[in-house]
């Protein structure tokens, strides 16, 4: 996406957004409510069109690539009275499969999602979780190269969430590119190898997880001294703070010092119970970035 | 194109190949006809006999005699038989209507085999009223002076009293019989025989031939002039409106069940709308075919098939397509803008005002198919195709080819414009949730990119 802007009346939902998703990548698409995620995804899917900028998907215009994309929208929707087999056949045929191929793919996917018995049943007879699995099958049965999943785990029990998570990983390992939008940040942290964060229609973050952690590393070492005495002053340590009422202390480091050298120095100086370099969670980074933005 | 056909096929199959469609389009109309026939055959009203005495005060012997004859049971009940379908279509229609009327009249006439008609003196008026009130007498008829005088300028009054629980059929029989007895008495007073006069008053059959400007002649038919345009237009209205309604309901279902976004990930809004319009055009065409087949059977029975030419049918087919496209555009716009049927009703109000216009124009255009109203409304969408069908069927002579071509051309342009506008509204509306837009907001959506 290059300089993509979308307005609805006086509201700018997406503002000059640039996004590159490398092939084979599993990217987490994050942002608070109303950030413009669904609008961006709908433009990727060519459901709506940008007012400015360009969207290219799999090397083509978004519209031309439609059959090579699988899409699980946030708002789940099935024809209530339609049988699952008929629904999957219909969606498969709309995605370019023949009737026979659509039926075969439907059977394979329902087996893979551990729901083969649902094929002859009407959608309205299924539980919410089962309907979600059917919809997931509908989004991938045409063997897409790019899969866009908008909140795929919402409403699923832990067992089915784990099943779906495993399937998403397998699809990724098979080489498919996956864009995964979620509010559950630890899921993104576990699944994704790249994160794209937007707020109020503009990009806040676009990097791989390692790069993000390096960039937002707080240069703090947490130490649990156990029964050992206080931590002595060490080279590279700017200050020592005790954030809570426990024994744990935080060593705030100088900008230039080597974190590993300081950790070794701590271990040499005091028989501590644990010492660790503190890694900010995605949730902390997300909150920090969103909250630190000036109000528009 | 392939996706458009897949959508169209799905919409067609999931509408036509359902029990609901079969029940709504075939079973219910057949049931209505069967129930109507069954009701007329089996549900004969239980009419109590009119018995006792009907007393007449101040009536002459002639009046009493004529009233007695009118109230006497018919010598033989009119047979309820199939009408003789011979002669022109008009004759057959009139014959069927006359038979139906006679059969209905026979069914509602009370039995009068135990009824007497007696002449009584005016001094007994109050006693006779009391007898009627108590049910001892069947009725009381008082003839005003001058009623039997054929030269009187005033019509005069025949006053009738009936029992408190007398059914409407008793009132109607006594009232009609008394009126006819008064007229017959006047005729007799003039030295005429009422039965002869009545026979003489029966109008002859008429045969109207229109001399065509090209030199030919054409037998004029009331059925062709009035019933055919009405039938054609009603048929067109019903099938296009039903198809449009299916389209609206299908769009609302896909929005309310959130299936719309799944579909739009596979097809563009334009493809989806076009597929839907095509699919439900098929549904409308199936209905049109079914009803036309029934109409053809009826017209064959009435030997009226020659009232419709193939050219008329072809033109009606063209205007059916145009009418459907215009109605479908309106219905698709409404369906895409709302989230449920309740919201749809608020937008259907203004749409119905427009869609009902052909019904209101029907009598005017049928009477004067080439008048100003007919000509002007032939170019106003979405009523234009309906009016053109009315005009084609009602016009005594073929409409000028140039005028028909202009109307078709203009309607094609209007239908294309309406479909384009509906497509713009559809594209915005199908993804909208929440409060339904006003008609003005809908117009604004057309401008959205």
Image: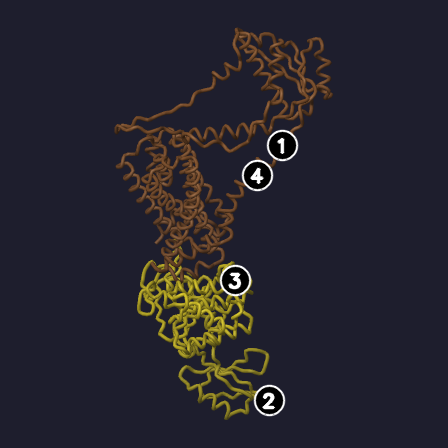
Q: In the image, is residue A113 above or below residue B449? A: below
Tag 4 residue = B38
Indicate which label's residue lies in the foreground, 1 or 2: 1
State the colouring used for the structure image: by chain
Tag 2 residue = A227
Judging from the image, mark 2 belongs to the subunit labelled A
Indicate which label's residue lies in the foreground, 3 or 1: 1
**Labels 4 and 3 in the same subunit:** no
Judging from the image, mark 1 belongs to the subunit labelled B
Disc 4/disc 1 C-alpha distance (Å): 13 Å
**Between B285 and A143, which is closer to the camera in this rendering?**
B285
Disc 4/disc 3 C-alpha distance (Å): 42 Å
- The crowd level at tag 1 (other Cα within 10 Å; few <14, some 14-19, many 20+) is few
- The crowd level at tag 2 (other Cα within 10 Å; few <14, some 14-19, many 20+) is few
Residue at x-position 37% and y-position 76%: A24
**Labels 1 and 2 in the same subunit:** no
**Labels 2 and 3 in the same subunit:** yes
Tag 1 residue = B45
- The crowd level at tag 4 (other Cα within 10 Å; few <14, some 14-19, many 20+) is few
Disc 3/disc 1 C-alpha distance (Å): 51 Å
**Between B339 and B170, which is closer to the camera in this rendering?**
B170
Q: Is residue B126 left or right of residue A128?
A: right
SS for dot 3 = helix
Judging from the image, mark 3 belongs to the subunit labelled A
Q: Which badge, 2 or 3, comes first in the chain's sequence?
A: 3
Tag 3 residue = A123
Give the image location of residue A245, x and y in percent: 59, 79
Residue at x-position 33% and y-position 30%: B396
**Labels 2 and 4 in the same subunit:** no
Where's the N terminus of chain A, which quadrant?
A: bottom left
Tell whether label 4 touches label 2 (CB within 8 Å): no
């Amino acid at each position: 996406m290059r300089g993509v802007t979308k307005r609805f009346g006086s509201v700018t939902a997406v503002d000059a957004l640039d996004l590159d998703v490398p092939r084979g990548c599993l990217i987490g698409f994050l942002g608070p409510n109303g950030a413009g995620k669904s609008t961006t995804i709908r433009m990727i899917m060519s459901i709506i069109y940008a007012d400015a900028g360009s969207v290219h998907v799999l090397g083509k215009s978004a519209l031309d690539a439609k059959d090579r994309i699988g899409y699980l929208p946030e708002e789940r929707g099935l024809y209530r009275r339609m049988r699952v087999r008929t629904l999957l056949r219909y969606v498969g045929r709309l995605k370019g499969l023949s009737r026979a191929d659509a039926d075969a793919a439907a059977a394979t996917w329902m087996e893979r999602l551990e729901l083969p018995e649902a094929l002859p049943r009407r959608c309205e007879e299924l539980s919410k979780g089962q309907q979600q699995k059917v919809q997931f099958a509908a989004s991938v049965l045409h063997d897409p190269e790019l899969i866009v999943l908008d909140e795929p785990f919402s409403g699923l029990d832990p067992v089915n969430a784990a099943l779906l998570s495993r399937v998403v990983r397998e699809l990724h390992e098979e080489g498919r590119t996956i864009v995964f939008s979620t509010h559950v940040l630890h899921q993104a942290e576990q699944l994704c190898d790249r994160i794209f964060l937007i707020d109020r229609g503009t990009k806040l973050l676009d990097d791989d997880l390692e790069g993000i952690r390096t960039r937002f590393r707080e240069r703090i070492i947490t130490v649990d001294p156990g029964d050992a005495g206080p931590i002595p002053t060490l080279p590279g340590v700017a200050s020592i703070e005790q954030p809570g009422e426990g024994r744990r202390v935080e060593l705030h480091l100088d900008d230039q010092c080597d974190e590993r050298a300081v950790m070794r120095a701590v271990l040499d100086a005091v028989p501590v119970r644990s010492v660790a370099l503190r890694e900010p969670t995605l949730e902390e980074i997300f909150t920090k970035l969103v909250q630190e933005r000036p109000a528009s | 194109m392939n996706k458009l056909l897949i959508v169209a096929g799905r919409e067609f199959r999931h509408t036509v190949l359902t029990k609901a469609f079969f029940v709504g389009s075939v079973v219910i109309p057949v049931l209505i006809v069967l129930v109507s026939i069954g009701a007329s055959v089996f549900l004969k009203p239980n009419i109590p006999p009119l018995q006792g005495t009907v007393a007449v005060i101040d009536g002459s012997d002639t009046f009493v005699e004529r009233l007695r004859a009118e109230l006497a049971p018919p010598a033989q009940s009119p047979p309820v038989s199939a009408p003789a379908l011979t002669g022109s279509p008009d004759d057959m229609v009139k014959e069927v209507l006359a038979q139906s009327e006679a059969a209905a009249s026979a069914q509602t006439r009370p039995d009068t085999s135990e009824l007497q008609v007696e002449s009584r003196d005016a001094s007994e008026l109050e006693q006779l009223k009391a007898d009627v009130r108590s049910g001892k007498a069947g009725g009381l008829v008082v003839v005003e002076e001058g009623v039997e005088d054929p030269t009187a300028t005033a019509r005069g009054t025949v006053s009738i009293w009936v029992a408190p629980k007398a059914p409407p059929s008793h009132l109607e029989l006594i009232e009609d019989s008394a009126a006819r007895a008064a007229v017959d008495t006047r005729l007799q007073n003039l030295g005429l025989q009422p039965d002869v006069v009545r026979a003489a008053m029966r109008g002859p059959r008429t045969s109207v031939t229109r001399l065509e400007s090209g030199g030919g002649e054409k037998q004029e038919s009331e059925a062709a002039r009035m019933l055919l345009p009405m039938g054609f237009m009603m048929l067109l209205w019903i099938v296009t409106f039903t198809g449009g309604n299916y389209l609206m309901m299908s769009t609302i279902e896909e929005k309310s069940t959130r299936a719309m976004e799944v579909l739009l990930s596979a097809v563009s809004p334009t493809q989806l709308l076009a597929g839907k319009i095509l699919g439900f055009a098929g549904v409308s065409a199936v209905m049109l075919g079914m009803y036309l087949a029934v109409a053809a059977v009826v017209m064959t029975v009435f030997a009226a098939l020659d009232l419709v030419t193939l050219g008329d049918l072809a033109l009606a087919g063209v205007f059916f397509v145009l009418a459907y496209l215009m109605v479908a555009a309106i219905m698709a716009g409404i369906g895409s803008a709302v989230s449920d049927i309740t919201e749809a009703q608020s937008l259907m109000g203004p749409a119905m005002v427009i869609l009902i216009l052909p019904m209101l124009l029907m009598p005017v255009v049928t009477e004067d198919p080439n008048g100003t109203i007919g000509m002007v409304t032939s170019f106003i969408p979405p009523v234009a195709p309906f009016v053109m069908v009315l005009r084609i069927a009602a016009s005594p002579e073929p409409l000028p080819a140039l005028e028909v071509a202009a109307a078709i051309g203009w309607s094609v342009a209007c239908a294309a414009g309406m479909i384009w506008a509906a497509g713009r509204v559809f594209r915005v509306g199908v993804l909208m949730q929440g409060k339904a837009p006003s008609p003005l907001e809908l117009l604004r959506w057309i401008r959205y990119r």
